[in-house]
Image (tube, rainbow, N blue to C red):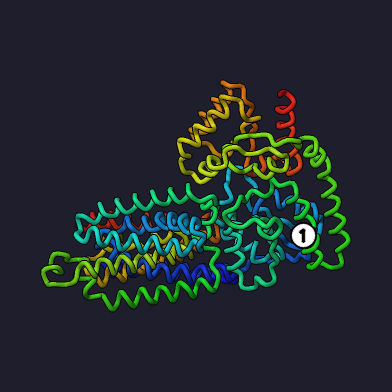
Amino acid sequence: MFAFDFMRQAFLAGTIVAIMGGFIGVFVIARGLSFITHTFSHIGFSGAAFAVFMGWNPFNGLLLFTTLSAVSVGQLGVKYFRRDASINVILSVFLGMGILFLALSTNQASFVSNILFGSVVGIGMKEVWKIAILSSIVFMCLIVGYRMLKFDSFDPVGAEAAGLPVRKISIGFLVLLSIAVAEAVQIVGALLVFTLMTIPASTARLITPSIFKMIICSILLSVASVWIGLTLGYYTDLPISFFITSIQGIFYISAILFHQLSR
Amino acid sequence: MKKKVFYFLFTIIISVLLAGCSANNDNQSSRTDISVVAAEGFYGEIVEAVGGDLVEVMSIIDDPNIAPHDYEATPSVSKAVSKANLIVYNGAGYDDWMEKLWNASSNNENIKRIIVAPDLMGVQPGENVHVWYHPETMPKLANELAAQLSEIMPEKKDTFNRNASEFISSLQPLNTLIDRLKQSEPVLVDTSEPVFDYMLAALNFEVNNPDFELAIAEGTDPSPKDLAAVQSDIKEKRIAFFVNNIQSDSPIIQNLVMLTKENDVPVIEVTETNPKGKNYVRWITDLLKQMEKVMKEK
């Protein structure tokens, strides 16, 4: 299996994305933002349509739209209960704009935007480096802001009372997340980014109440699913994303059963 | 209890690693053939025609139910690409996973590429990608294949060149049909999607609803004005026929097809990729015959 460079690179990139997704996912789940990781890839599509209309490189459109939408969501709803509504509004508006640019442009944007979505078995060494650098930046940002982010994510009321800049934290985290999603989607594809940034953290939350252990657990589950998924995909020749997503599903359901039984 | 969870995960990770390291002996078949991977079956067919016995071709998408632009590559496809001498794909965004698979291979300077749309037909991303319906594409591809295969196996250059010219002359009946069908004056038609447009242009048919067909292809709603224009084209019999891509279906198109029946406007049924069991020449010939019949009845 490791005789082929594409499998080695898939393992490397997959592991890196899994670690990053497992880590950032804990905050995504705690802040009630899981829907937005999914939203970003849709908005990215609109961004690509806009880029095609303007004659730009589609990736710039994707990055512009996801960052812009992250800032807008942050501005509209800092409060937890308003966040869901803000995401809905921003998603609808940006998707609508995407349809407008598709209609305005005389080019076929849907084919162009295919370039934006990666495939696990099509990762080159250059992409491995790219995802490694991106992930280290995300990792450093998370570690630097760890205390503030932890406080604000798990105790928003307390954080505000303590005088933390909650709006800045919220927007900063959303922008970081949007860039991470935009880059990772290009390399491993939209479905895997969404899965790895949400499910392992949700599962970990059922296993342990401690935030640090939650992060470790989430990363381990995420890495395990990628490794098993890649191995099963290699030997059965069925799509790898199917295995990774269903393994994540199994992990989550077992954690729920485990949680209920232990109570 | 938490410890148990950690041990569980640890065991899984270790066993995966072991499985990965041990089961590693893919038998390398000892063949001296040239190995070619084609993204679409209709290109693979031309590779077979030009390469003959000297070439082993793998066509990835050879099923009309799979849309190449929605395809997710499996590991065996990636493996085949990394071992290939030459890969052939359409490009221009239609099947760019092939480019990614090529990129993932570290020895890719040894894997030659023919990217049909941009390299042979000058089609850029965003333009109509369905170049295989252009009558000039396959002859150009055959010649390019002969050139590339000859670089890989120079001693068989004559064979490849002969096969390519044999293939091109096998297209002669098709070209005769195209010449016969070619309209002297531009004739208006409407289409459901831009899949067949290169052939229509070659036959001097003019697509009267370019915005509409693009909207359907993009999966967005056509504007009410564009839809009304297509409806009046049908009702007032302004078009010679309606071209319907039967591989994709939408309620808007179904209603339009009903309208054509009520108004006795003929429908030409096309597919984006070749139907099962029909080779390229047969597929295009059948389509053109369908069109000839319609034009005769007029």
* Res B272 visible: yes
Q: Position of residue B1 (x, y in %)?
A: 26, 66
Q: Nearer the viewer, residue B112 or B19?
A: B112
Instruction: Look at 65% across and 61% down and name the residue there.
Output: B80
The quadrant the C terminus of chain B occupies is top right
In the structure shown, which secondary structural element does the residue marked by tag 1 occupy?
helix
Instruction: Look at 64% across and 44% down and name the residue there.
Output: B273
* Res A117 visible: no
Q: Quadrant of residue A40?
A: bottom left
Instruction: Look at 55% across and 68% down and name the residue there.
Output: A7
Q: Quadrant of residue A34?
A: bottom left
Q: Nearer the viewer, residue A131 or A121?
A: A131
Total count of labels: 1
Q: Which residue is tagged 1?
A: B144
Q: Nearer the viewer, residue B270 or B8?
A: B270
Q: Chain of mark 1?
A: B
A42 displayed left or right of B227: left
Instruction: Look at 53% across and 36% down and name the residue there.
Output: B249
Of all residues shown, which one is farthest toward the front? B185
Q: Position of residue A68 (x, y in %)?
A: 35, 62
Q: Position of residue A10 (x, y in %)?
A: 51, 67
Residue type at mark 1 is: Glu
Vertical comparison of B71 with A160: above or below:
above
Q: Quadrant of residue A42?
A: bottom left
Vertical comparison of B124 with A2: above or below:
above
Crowding near pointer 1: few (<14 within 10 Å), some, many (20+)?
Answer: some
Q: Position of residue A189 (x, y in %)?
A: 47, 60
Vertical comparison of A228 with B216: above or below:
below
